[in-house]
Image (cartoon, helix red, strand yellow):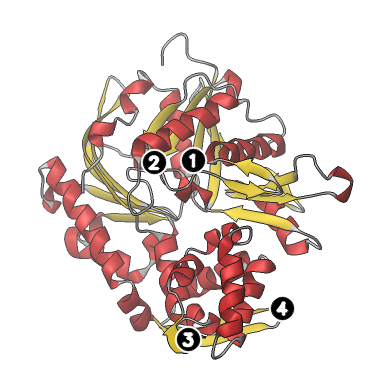
Amino acid sequence: MSSDSPAVSIGVDFGTSNTVVALATEEGRVETVRFAHGESTQSVYASALCFWQEPSRRGLPPSVEGGPWAIERLIEHNGALRFLQSFKTLAASRSFQSTTIFQQRFQFEDMLTTFLRTLTRHARGAVDLANASVTVGRPVRFAGAAPDEALAMQRYRESFARLGVASARFVFEPVGAAFSFARGLEGDATVLVADFGGGTSDFSILRFSRAGGVLRADPLGFSGVGVAGDSFDSRIVDHVAAPRFGKGGQYRSFGKVLPLPKHFYGKLARWHELALMKAGADLRELRELARAALDPAPLDDFIELIERDLGYALYRAVSEAKLALSARDSVEFRFAVDGIDIRAPIARAEFEGWIAKDLARIDAAVEDVLHQANIGPQAIDRVFLTGGTSFVPAVQRLFVARFGAAKLTSADQFESIASGLALIGQSQNPDQWAAHPHQVASG
């Protein structure tokens, strides 16, 4: 560690679904920040925002909460609100410029800055970004069909600059996980880290060694793909929930019977976009389609889902079904909220068929990172899988087939990335770990 390093290093793992912050001291101690919510404390802070307008504050900026407090507000709400989650997926989208929330325009930078302010407030003084070494995780590949990495990083930097962070260090998320994992290695090792987040799956190969007690890592390859937990969730939505909300239905227009537009159901599968539909032209168009539909009831339920901000409840039902399929051969999907009742059996084999193309893209990204490193599977000493999606049996089989079960270590460690990022900030020459554009795979 250099002599001018701040006494505290902060690691920020801003995730699609959850955010974790860790603190590392000069003595090498690291701990995650815990948030007291209700009668419990938790280290994960949901990547969510909830806005509402107080009647007495009309014309003024809306009130806002973040994390579990945003979810609590959503569940208990009795008035107009806007709920946003998974907005990280918008970071690299050039098509997303802003959204209007209670007559106030929010760009991505506004959303991220607002979110981090709620986090620091609920951390009760434990997270002082302006007076610490700040290391922030970033995906190897940002989510989206045509992600603009330069735009995403510009938005990230602007957001942290608004919070007083003069020069945040940005490190690939799997490198943070690798740094945390490597502390427990007893000898030199070539490690593949597979980090399955909500929006992206990222892969890194690093050669770890120690000299004079100092941990050194030589990066050999990086790869990533915009497929992860949310993608698997979307397959369940597409095959189980979307038909119940009218997908495959028809409407009458100028004497012709036409299929309902598919683009609405793409947004349903990306459930976090439902909140953006609430204030846009999509909702008006859905109402017009419902009036012309041969069977309007499913579209009426779709409109209800959007208007009553039930996207989060749908997301929870889908996530629970996916998690259950990791342990059982079949489950019953159930979503019953405010008069909308969806029940359907899902077999694991059926689910694996739905995600087959996603698995192929993950496998191709693993092949790509091996190609970049110019090594074969036999040269990998350890494989560290992190993130909830790493427990999906089909994902496990993919890595067992390539590397063998003995090399795999799998952990749903929400804290590993943030802890590694904080430790990097206290390491000797921490900037050597920073991500550089030329390291990102082109495929």
Q: N-terminal of the two: label 3 or label 1?
A: 1
Left or right of 306, for residue 199: left
Tell me the residue that label 3 is attached to. Answer: 249
Category of crowding for the residue at label 3, using alpha-carbon neighbours closer than 10 angstroms: few (below 14), some (14–19), many (at least 20): some
Left or right of 66, for residue 87: left
Tell me the residue that label 4 is attached to. Answer: 338
| Mark 3 or mark 1, whichever is nearer to me | 3
Numbered circle sitting on residue 39: none
Q: Do callouts 2 and 1 mark residues in contact (Cβ within 8 Å)?
A: yes
**Residue 16's x, y, as percent?**
49, 51
Tell me the residue that label 1 is attached to. Answer: 13
Q: Is residue 266 above or below residue 272?
A: below
Q: Is residue 414 above or below residue 260?
A: above
Mark yes or no: residue 151 visible: yes
Q: Amino acid at mark 3?
A: Gly
Tell me the residue that label 2 is attached to. Answer: 173
Query: In percent of the image, x 56 and y 90: which residue is there?
Result: 295
| Mark 2 or mark 4, whichever is nearer to me | 4
**Residue 404's x, y, as percent?**
20, 61
Q: CA distance from mark 3 to mark 2?
A: 42 Å
| Mark 3 or mark 4, whichever is nearer to me | 3
Q: N-terminal of the two: label 1 or label 4?
A: 1
For the residue pair 364 and 320, the one nearer the viewer reads as 364
Give the residue at the far right of this rendering.
56
Q: Amino acid at mark 1?
A: Asp
Q: N-terminal of the two: label 2 or label 1?
A: 1
Q: CA distance from mark 2 to mark 4?
A: 39 Å
Q: N-terminal of the two: label 3 or label 4?
A: 3
Q: CA distance from mark 1 to mark 4?
A: 35 Å
